[in-house]
Amino acid sequence: MEYFILRNGKPKGPFTRSQIEAGIKQGKLRDTDFISTASNGPWKTIKQSFFVDSVESKRSPFDSSVGNFDAQQSLQWDNHKTDADSVIENPPSLPVSASEKCSRLPPTIDLGIDSLIPPPLERIAETVASGPNELHKTLSCSTRSVHKSDRTVPWMLGIIASGAVLLALLSNLFSVPRNSPFGSVASPFVPIQRVKQSEVDSVLIQTETDDISSKNVNQQIACYSRGAMKMASLVALSYGADSSAIEKTLHEIKIDEIGATTVFQQKVVYFQGMMKFLAIASRSAGSPEFKIESALSQVRVAEIGSKTVHQQCVSYSKGCLKLVELIAIQESASQDQIQLIQSSVSKSDITADTVYQQQVAQLTGLCKMLVIAAKSRGVESSKTSGALLEIERADISAKTVFQQEVNRLIVIMKLLGSLAVGR
């Protein structure tokens, strides 16, 4: 029987019983995660119906009647394996726009003290980035909940709403990027954290130790892509990212690891994880949200046409390259150098005969972009200048594109570490 895990509205799976048990023991699954035998539910929390005593009793997660499940039905566990190229990314519901939320409100609402409170500032801040129209809808949604027949309170709501609009628009209007000629600003919410060199060295040592047990070049690729993903999380922390967001992303990656049955699927998980951390880092560095979303949206579109895990990795590599570019821009890197790198990658991508050559081209561009970002952040040139030379030397003995990919992942991991430590 196949089992699915639901978190943040996205189903993952299918998984076997042994995989779920391993996830529970390793702490990759939480009691609050949802589980079902179908990708579309019905869902129950693991704490309610699964593995409260499952490791000891081996009891079926749906012994009691739930939803459409027959309580007397015998659920057989098997060793089903997930397809190497299948990725489930279908959220069960679509986001609701502000106008749709307003239309769902009841026609009349009793006026009390709560009716005097404007929309939460967090909600206003989220909609400011979408433009004045969306912000107007959000505020209108709040004022529209007042009964039309009441004539004593609306003017108070109008004053409060107008003040909120003015503050939000002024904040959005006068926000200045780091590389703006009018001035510079630091990360807006969380102060930049210092990442110690010892933390970077720990990731390097652990990755090199894991590489000892690699039996082939594909296992090496998975090993070093995992190391690069860990370094990307340190970069996010160094720019002041919330540690809880980092932990949440790491937990999601651990769940994805449960369903990865091949080194190629593991590679997809780690490249996607690296992209997620770089998105967090770019956001924390002050990059405009619409540019980050644009980069991620391009990756999602490319995923639709991806038929293999290798094509997926190319898409994630492109996303990583774009996100590092946004970080470099926030660090006032040369626009000419950035454009030169992107142009070089585009040409290499066009002339590539295979998806593996495309991957090497993207990773080469990522190395170059990381060098620019690190230099612009104040990293010593001695830590960055030899990166590209190291690749050239390693490529001399590389007989396949897979070995070239390993060489670039090693350098990417080191450069991410240098970017995390900074000056």
Image (cartoon, helix red, strand yellow):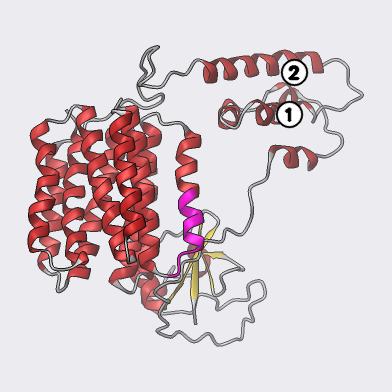
Q: Position of residue 253 (x, y in %)?
A: 36, 57
Left or right of 369 on screen, residue 378: left
Quarter where residue 261 is shown: bottom left
Q: Position of residue 338 (x, y in %)?
A: 31, 35
- Please tell me which of labels 1 and 2 falls first in the chain: 1
Magenta-drawn stretch contains 303 = yes
- Dot 2 corresponds to which residue? 157
- Dot 1 corresponds to which residue? 142
Answer whether residue 165 is visible to the viewer in this image. Answer: yes
- Secondary structure type for disc 2: helix
Quarter where residue 282 is shown: top left
Left or right of 16 on screen, residue 390: left
Magenta stretch: give its range.
298-307
Kindly indicate whether the residue at mark 2 contacts the one at mark 1 (C-beta within 8 angstroms). Answer: yes
Magenta-drawn stretch contains 163 = no
Residue 170, above or below 394: above
Q: Amino acid at mark 2?
A: Leu
Magenta region's main secondary structure? helix
Residue 347, above or below 13: above
Residue visible at 45% across and 39% down in the picture: 292
Q: Front-most of 309 and 8?
A: 309
Q: Front-most of 23 and 13?
A: 13
Q: Front-most of 1 and 268?
A: 268
For this orientation, the residue located farthest to the right is 149
